[in-house]
Image (cartoon, rainbow, N blue to C red):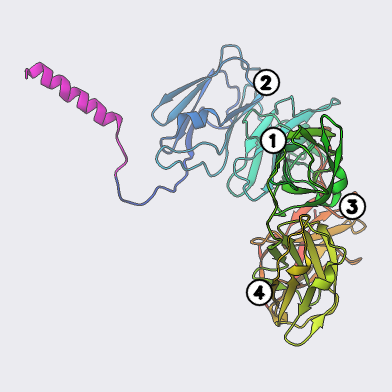
């Protein structure tokens, strides 16, 4: 092999090796977030006349993540250039695009990640300069309360007599929330503002209805030279649902059962067999629905059971109407075609799931209830005689209520004893499905009441100058979302939670302006303020036999 060919091969191998360099193995994992350590010109420069700024990062960062995290207020028209030199980014503005006597705010959001381990910036970086001889000092700061606040945007709109529409208009000022939910908007000029917290998944600086979660300010926001700082403007996020529910798919699984799947979760308290029927496309013969039930109470799927089998294999349509989602949106009437099935129904009714108040089949001894979910629908009018609630020597009276045609709620009407074992016996021989299937068996559910000494509690008071308003407090278990206790405060603004299951809790309070007993999130467009809320400063660790007292929630 000639020397020149050997050198070419070595050169190719060298290039390939450099192109595939990997970080050295071993050592501690990089957990340090990147940050901006230097800017040019200096922060709060006045009489700026240049056409570019420079930002230097503490380490190498992903260039695309930076480009998508740079927000400039007010907007600069034209194409902006991003030039890199090592860890330094130069942002170049189009000629004649910078306005006179204007304060510009440059926000680098928390979507910036480093190259080494994809660590995100811990908090947004804000940099400002002015083309005039004055920097506006307006500032808004607060917190977004959410399970995952990092990356949420805060939009600020300077409003006049016209209505701001964040669905179509981008904000004048914007920042991004850090890992702890905290944010700070800087350099705001005097004026009246609408402020929103938006989880902007599309990163288009617009509010996308139904897709984006939102929070709305709880009071009027006015910045003046005498009062340039607004503190504790906090947000809780929710999702806006304006779409009507509908059925995604319909499948007939046997001669009697039709499986349907909704596009979203349906309010089961407002749906019944009257919402459906089956029609033959040729004869117009109608088949009524006998039972409606869900195999999984958290699922978007449900079963319909026909009163009688279908007579032929002609095209069939399921007609569905007037059911609701949890936001009160009502469905249109719709007809969904499906293929009939001639498969026999031979499955016997069995217990599918048991739901209790606490984990481990534990129930409260003062207000005990149990939900029994079966895997089929059946006639419930005389089922109480097939169910017994027992301990070792006694039986107890209870009330049955229908959740759906395959689900029952049992509420014991007698007070039970603390820390004692109980059981429910269900004679399945008395439960017959539409095809006449039954099973000669007794199903047993073993239960136990919670120990009275295991309970904890919390008590305290609302501190406020507005003692005529209605205040509610909310106690939320961090590990079990089912445990959420809401109470209206007493006339002296005190609150007390007795018999609370031990665990870690968040405590917060809100002013119930609309007197509906629930927190109102407000509206983005048309604009409507949320209700004012305040969180207690610490997480509560409620331990058994150790209630926490003297809690104070202070409203401004």
Q: Verify CB contact (< 8 Å) between mark 1 and mark 3.
A: no
C-alpha span from label 1 to label 3: 26 Å
Q: Quadrant of residue 441?
A: bottom right
Residue numbers of the magenta segment: 1-24
Which residue corresponds to mark 3?
516
C-alpha span from label 1 to label 4: 39 Å
Residue at disc 4, secondary structure: loop
Residue 211: assigned label:
1
Image x and y of residue 69, in percent: 56, 32
Q: Earlier in the sequence, mark 1 or mark 3?
A: 1
Which residue corresponds to mark 4?
543
Q: Residue at x 67, y 23 (%)?
A: 102
Q: Earlier in the sequence, mark 1 or mark 4?
A: 1
Q: Is residue 549 visible?
A: no
Residue 382: assigned label:
none
Total labels: the figure holds: 4
Q: Is residue 124 left or right of residue 396?
A: left
Residue at disc 2, secondary structure: loop
Which residue corresponds to mark 2?
101
Instruction: Look at the picture and state if 543 lies above or below 534.
Output: below
Between 431 and 394, the one lying in front of the other is: 431
Instruction: Look at the picture and state if 475 lies above or below 56.
Output: below
Q: Residue at x 89, y 56 (%)?
A: 466
As for residue 143 lying within the magenta part, the answer is: no
Q: Earlier in the sequence, mark 2 or mark 1?
A: 2
Neighbor class of circle 4 (other Cα within 10 Å; few <14, some 14-19, many 20+) is some
As for residue 3 lying within the magenta part, the answer is: yes
């Amino acid at each position: 092999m000639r020397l020149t060919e050997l050198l070419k091969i070595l050169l190719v191998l060298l290039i390939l090796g450099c192109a595939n360099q990997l970080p050295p193995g071993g050592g501690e994992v990089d957990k340090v977030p990147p940050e901006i350590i230097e800017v040019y010109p200096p922060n709060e420069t006045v009489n700026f006349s240049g056409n570019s700024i420079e930002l230097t990062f503490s380490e190498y960062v992903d260039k695309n993540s930076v480009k998508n995290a740079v927000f400039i207020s007010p907007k600069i028209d034209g194409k902006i250039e991003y030039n890199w030199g090592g860890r330094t980014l130069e942002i170049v503005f189009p000629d004649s695009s910078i306005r006179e006597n204007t304060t510009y705010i440059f926000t680098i959001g928390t979507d910036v990640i480093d190259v080494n381990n994809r660590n995100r910036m811990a908090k947004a970086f804000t940099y400002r300069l002015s083309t005039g001889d004055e920097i506006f000092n307006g500032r808004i700061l607060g917190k977004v309360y959410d399970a995952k606040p990092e990356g949420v945007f805060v939009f600020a709109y300077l409003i006049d007599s016209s209505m701001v529409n964040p669905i179509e208009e981008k904000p004048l000022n914007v920042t991004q929330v850090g890992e702890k939910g905290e944010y700070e908007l800087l350099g705001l000029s005097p004026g009246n503002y609408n402020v929103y917290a938006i989880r902007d998944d599309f990163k288009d600086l617009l509010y996308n209805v139904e897709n984006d979660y939102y929070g709305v300010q709880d009071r009027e926001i006015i910045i003046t030279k005498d009062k340039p700082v607004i503190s504790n403007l906090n947000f809780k996020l929710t999702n806006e649902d304006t779409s009507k529910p509908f059925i995604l798919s319909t499948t007939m699984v046997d001669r009697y059962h039709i499986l349907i799947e909704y596009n979203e979760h349906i309010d089961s308290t407002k749906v019944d067999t009257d919402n459906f029927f089956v029609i033959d496309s040729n004869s117009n013969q109608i088949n009524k629905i006998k039972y409606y039930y869900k195999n999984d109470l958290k699922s978007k799927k449900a079963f319909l059971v026909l009163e009688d089998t279908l007579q032929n294999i002609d095209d069939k349509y399921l007609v569905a109407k007037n059911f609701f989602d949890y936001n009160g949106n009502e469905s249109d009437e719709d007809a969904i075609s499906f293929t009939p099935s001639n498969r026999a129904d031979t499955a016997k009714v069995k217990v599918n799931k048991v739901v209790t108040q606490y984990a481990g089949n534990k129930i409260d001894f003062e207000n005990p209830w149990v939900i029994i979910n079966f895997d089929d629908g059946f006639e419930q009018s005389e089922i109480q005689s097939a169910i017994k609630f027992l301990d070792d020597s006694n039986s107890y009276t209870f009330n049955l209520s229908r959740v759906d045609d395959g689900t029952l709620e049992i509420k014991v009407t007698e007070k039970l004893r603390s820390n004692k074992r109980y059981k429910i016996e269900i004679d399945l021989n008395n439960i017959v499905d539409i095809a006449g299937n039954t099973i000669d068996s007794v199903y047993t559910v073993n239960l136990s009441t919670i120990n009275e000494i295991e309970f904890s509690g919390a008590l305290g008071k609302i501190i406020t100058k507005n003692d005529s308003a209605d205040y509610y407090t909310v106690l939320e278990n961090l590990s079990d979302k089912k445990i959420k206790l809401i109470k209206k405060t007493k006339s002296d603004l005190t609150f007390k939670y007795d018999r609370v299951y031990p665990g870690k809790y968040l405590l917060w309070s809100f002013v119930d302006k609309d007197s509906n007993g629930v927190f109102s999130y407000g509206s983005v467009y048309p604009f409507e303020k949320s209700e004012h809320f305040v969180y207690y400063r610490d997480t509560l660790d409620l331990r058994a036999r150790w209630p926490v007292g003297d809690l104070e929630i202070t409203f401004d």
